[in-house]
Image: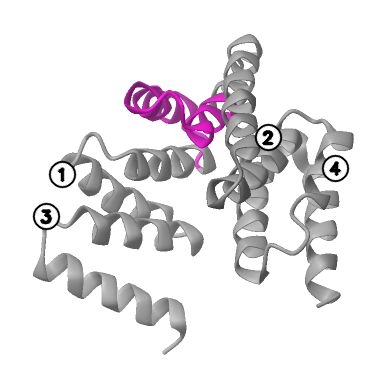
Amino acid sequence: MGRYEEALADYGRAVEAHPGYVWAATSRGELYERLGRYGEALADLDRAVGLDPSSEWALCARARVYLRLGRHEEAVADCVRTVEIDAEDGWNQMLYAVALRVAGDGQGAEGRFGRALRSFTALDEGGGEKAVDARQGLLVLACARLDTDAAATRCEALRGIGEELIEETVEDLLFLREAFPEAGPGVGAAVRRLRSFQSTR
């Protein structure tokens, strides 16, 4: 049994033992998303949102699945809810911007991208653990805005963050490329640059 199958089995046992456990349903939904099993992902994420309608995590995960399926209006609706819950979260604002852009609202997307930029910049300037998350967000944001120069600079800011965080950033970038294909060239360059950091360790 591979690690994903083991994780699915573990999450399944957790969901069965504790049907009201939002963490287990959301975690399994995200794993199904990673495996491309979007119907099963939606079932778990619908369950998680039903259990806790204010779970930003479950709402964002479901919005990503909707975007992967081309269900833009539903993705936008979930993103609206996430920014109502926490308007200061840069990731919420950026996902909302991507959903708006692929739904055809470029002007609305730019406003949300601007809010994400302000949020990530403030966290980056604050230093500490949140600065790394902010730098990851700033890279994905640069690619989403089709700003290849900024993306190159943002890649350099992630040098030395460690294998796991590089993989997490690459995963975010690959999602962006799938949801918003116009970002593909910038995403490809950023992923290659991040992978080069791994090969030099």
- Which numbered tag is attached to residue 16? none
Q: Residues within 10 Å of mark 1 (few under 14, many from 20)?
A: some
**Mark 2 or mark 1, which is nearer the start of the sequence?**
1
Can you identify the residue that label 3 sits on? 20
* Picture coordinates of residue 128, whole percent (x, y): 57, 50
Where residue 75 sits, quadrant-wise, is top left
Mark 1 vs mark 2, CA separation in Å: 31 Å
Task: Give the mark nearest the N terminus, 4 or 1.
Answer: 1
> How far is disc 4 from disc 1 in space, using C-alphas?
41 Å
In the drawing, what numbered circle is on residue 153? Answer: 4
- Mark 1 and mark 2 residues within 8 Å of each other at the beta carbon: no
Q: Earlier in the sequence, mark 2 or mark 4?
A: 2
Q: CA distance from mark 2 to mark 4?
A: 12 Å
> Label 1, on which residue?
51
Residue assigned mark 2: 141
Observer-side mark, 2 or 4, equals 4
> Which stretch is magenta?
69-98
Q: Is residue 14 above or below residue 21?
A: below
At horizontal 69% and vertical 44% (from top left) the residue drawn is 177
